Amino acid sequence: MRMMDPAQFDAAVAAANIPGAVGMIVDPDGVRFARAVGEADAVGHVPMREDTLFQIASMTKAVTSVAAMQLVEQGRLSLDSDIGLVLPDLANPQVMLGTGPDGKPQLRPAKGPITLRHLLTHTAGLGYFFIHPEVLGWYAATRMPEPGSLNSIRMPLMFDPGESWEYSVATDWVGQAVEAVAGQTLGDYFAEHVTGPLGMNATAFRPEMPADAAKVHVRAAGGGWEINPAVLGGGEFHMGGGGLSSTAADYARFVRMLLRGGELDGARILKAETIAEMTRNQVAPLRAGKMGSAMPEFASPYDTFPDQHTGWGLGFLINPEQGSHGRSPGSLAWAGIFNSYYWFDPAKQVGGVFMSQMAPFGDPGALAAFGALEELAYT
């Protein structure tokens, strides 16, 4: 195993002016680099550890996508059938037209049904209230739902299924489809079929975070840090799009499974041909990955590769050209809203996990430190 200098990562986190982070670099055979830097709680001064627990938010989406593809392999879900047959909430979808003179929303029937493939690729027409003003407008005209409720993912479409790419609550609906077919909660399904077999023993939906978990930090107006008490793992349902908490070590095992074509330590999670399908661009000629913001205090506008025509697989962003920090064309990646990130590179058989915990998403310092971790992997 080639040794990597931890001082490089330490310096990157220090320069980033973030409370702390955990970085890991993996290959199919194991962890090549692991480092915890700074503090998990910069107000209470709790040191960061390699096994610190984080809210991984949208890094949950990849786990939910894997679960759904297990059921596709078994013939219990179909990628291209009307998902409304499984999820009545998504049957006969309606598309927003705007508001009428009376201020009430106007809708029309969608041109076609929503499929599981649309949901996995964020081409269903759904959105996120913190990204899309259209969704905020819909809630303002109807009623702002309770966070963590099923109503928080119920909305009309912004466009007809398949016509555009917009990041969305779609993977929450994927989780609901898994529950409907499997007859168990998403957390129980994960424990039995994904996280359990992979030895991801710290990964779960948690309505409350333990005292020693990483806190969600926000920059205080006068300098220093304040704590945001937000917890995404509770609510009315298990959020397949963002509810898991995990550790860098646990998620590194998930990344290694993907690099190994669906298997880890003798546990076969998916067939190799299923992983190949998940890592293939599913949305061409559309471009994926660019997100605006309706709430910049929560999530800044984001575009990992603004100069590339990025694609999307069944759960992951795909860069078609060489990345600036070293990742090969065809590598896959995504992130969580509290500034956690991962990537895996099938061509060079390397991947990595970067965990920090702060808002808003897309913090320049956190992105720079994640980039430094990636550079370390390819140096």
Image: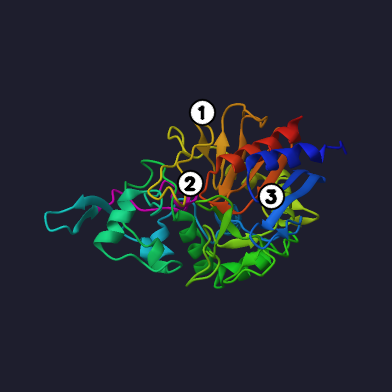
Q: As shown in the figure, which amino acid type bears the numbered disc 2?
A: Thr
Circle 2 residue: 121
Q: Which comes sooner in the sequence, label 2 or label 3? A: 3
* Residue 88, image x, y percentages: 37, 66
* Residue 5, image x, y percentages: 82, 37
In the image, residue 351 lies in the stretch drawn in magenta: no
Distance of label 1 from label 2 (alpha carbons): 18 Å
Q: Secondary structure at mark 1?
A: loop
Q: As shown in the figure, which amino acid type bears the numbered disc 1?
A: Gln
Q: Quadrant of residue 17?
A: top right
Q: Which mark is residue 308?
A: 1
The quarter of the image holding the C terminus is: top right
| Residue 367, above or below 248 | above
Circle 3 residue: 21
In contact (CB < 8 Å): disc 1 and disc 2: no
Left or right placement of residue 91 versus residue 191 in this view: left
In contact (CB < 8 Å): disc 3 and disc 1: no
Q: Residue at x 43, y 32 (%)?
A: 285
Residue lying furthest front: 222
Residue 279 shows in the view? no
Q: Secondary structure at mark 2?
A: helix
Left or right placement of residue 205 versus residue 97 in this view: right
The label nearer to you, 1 versus 2, is 1
Closer to us: 165 or 249: 249
Closer to us: 70 or 189: 189
Closer to us: 248 or 201: 248
Left or right placement of residue 5 versus residue 141 in this view: right
Q: As shown in the figure, which amino acid type bears the numbered disc 3?
A: Ala
In the image, residue 114 lies in the stretch drawn in magenta: yes
The span picked out in magenta is 109-123
